[in-house]
Amino acid sequence: GKPLERKAEEPVNLLEDNKENIIKDFRNMVKSDNDPFILVNFIDENIDKVAPEYKEEMIMELELVQEKYIERYTDQLFGEDHQMELLSLSSTGESEIQLFFDENKVEDIKNGNLRELVDKILLGKYKLINMEGSFYPIIDYEKLKIYNKYLSPEMKDYLEIKSMDSNMPTILDAGLMISFEKLSDRLIKAENHITKYPEGIRYEELLRLYGTYLKLYLEGSDNTPIYDYETKKIREEVLSSYKKTANIKDTVTSKIINKYIDIIKENENTIDVNVLSKITELYNEAIATLEEHK
């Protein structure tokens, strides 16, 4: 009964070929510059069918395409009177504009081109955020977590860290949007990821993110300084956050913040050039120490 045996095997091989074809199709779609929402559709239909090692690849590639499309979608959102319409739909009355465009308002968009554009953007797993009075697309990492069950612990952790910022930006229009304590939390999470996955797939991006958080944490921002304007003394909220962070065991961040607290104390809690001039050195030391772990 040899012919029978061969028949029984054939469907299995077809399935294997099919799996390979799916990922080839996906790679071709990425190469031929398809919008993120098209990739999302394809992923949702096929991710269950591909071999485990391709599932993560699909999500990682999607993120890179999303990044690539941000500029293109931004340009399109600034066409015609698009911004005017988005702002009028987002105003809550007292000249307050919502931070994120409300997805339930899409059907209220009168301009057909704009409605189609916003639809495409949201289906591509972005959200629209209001910065300095205009709406811009950012990747909605919270929406990407829907794929968590297909991902490695490393990639899940990466999405978790990135979603903190897409759920509530660290800084907007030169002001901190979160407390120093929350900022410290983001800083430590980024550091933990970097030290846990020194060969990580998104290592560079996380090191960049860590650097951004650290700089903000050490010097504040234009609209959220670390000191009181009148007295030039360090703000209580900031100092108490520094002290908490300094006590975290075995992190590069805590060592750096310990040094910073000493510099601030020596300067009688006054934030001036004596303190601020030391930030670059502390920052460089932190980044260099993290990179040594590699």
Image (spheres, rainbow, N blue to C red):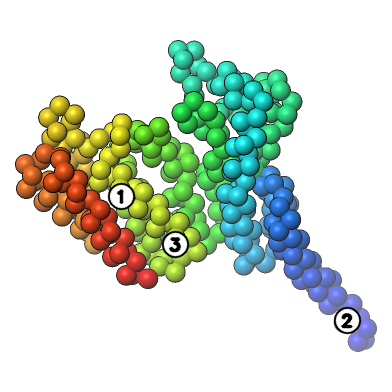
Question: Of the residues tagged 1 and 2, which is closer to the observer?
Answer: 1
Q: Amino acid at mark 2?
A: Arg
Which residue is rendered at x = 67% and y = 22% of the image? Answer: 109
Q: Is residue 142 above or below residue 229?
A: below
Q: Please, what secondary structure does the residue beneath circle 2 have?
A: helix
Which residue is rendered at x = 19% and y = 49% of the image? Answer: 277
Q: Quadrant of the N terminus?
A: bottom right
Along the line of sight, the residue nearer the viewer: 242 or 147: 242
Mark 1 → mark 2, Cα distance in angstroms: 62 Å
Q: Please, what secondary structure does the residue beneath circle 1 have?
A: helix
* Position of residue 46 in the picture relative to residue 88 (left or right): right
Q: Amino acid at mark 3?
A: Tyr
Q: How many marks?
A: 3
Quadrant of residue 267 in the image?
top left
Q: Please, what secondary structure does the residue beneath circle 3 have?
A: helix
Q: Is residue 218 above or below residue 84?
A: below
Where residue 24 sits: x, y (%)? 74, 65
Mark 3 → mark 1, Cα distance in angstroms: 16 Å
Please tell me how crowded label 1 is: few (under 14), some (14-19), or many (20+) other residues with Cα within 10 Å: many
Q: Amino acid at mark 1?
A: Leu
Q: Earlier in the sequence, mark 2 or mark 3?
A: 2
Look at mark 3 in the image and give the residue it sits on. 203
Residue 81 seen in the figure: yes
Look at mark 2 in the image and give the residue it sits on. 6
Where residue 165 sits: x, y (%)? 44, 42
Where residue 106 sits: x, y (%)? 65, 26
Which residue, as the protein is rendered here, is positioned at the far bottom? 2
Q: Earlier in the sequence, mark 3 or mark 1?
A: 3
* Position of residue 28 in the picture relative to residue 62 (left or right): right
Q: Is residue 114 above or below residue 268?
A: above
Mark 2 → mark 3, Cα distance in angstroms: 47 Å
Look at mark 1 in the image and give the residue it sits on. 214
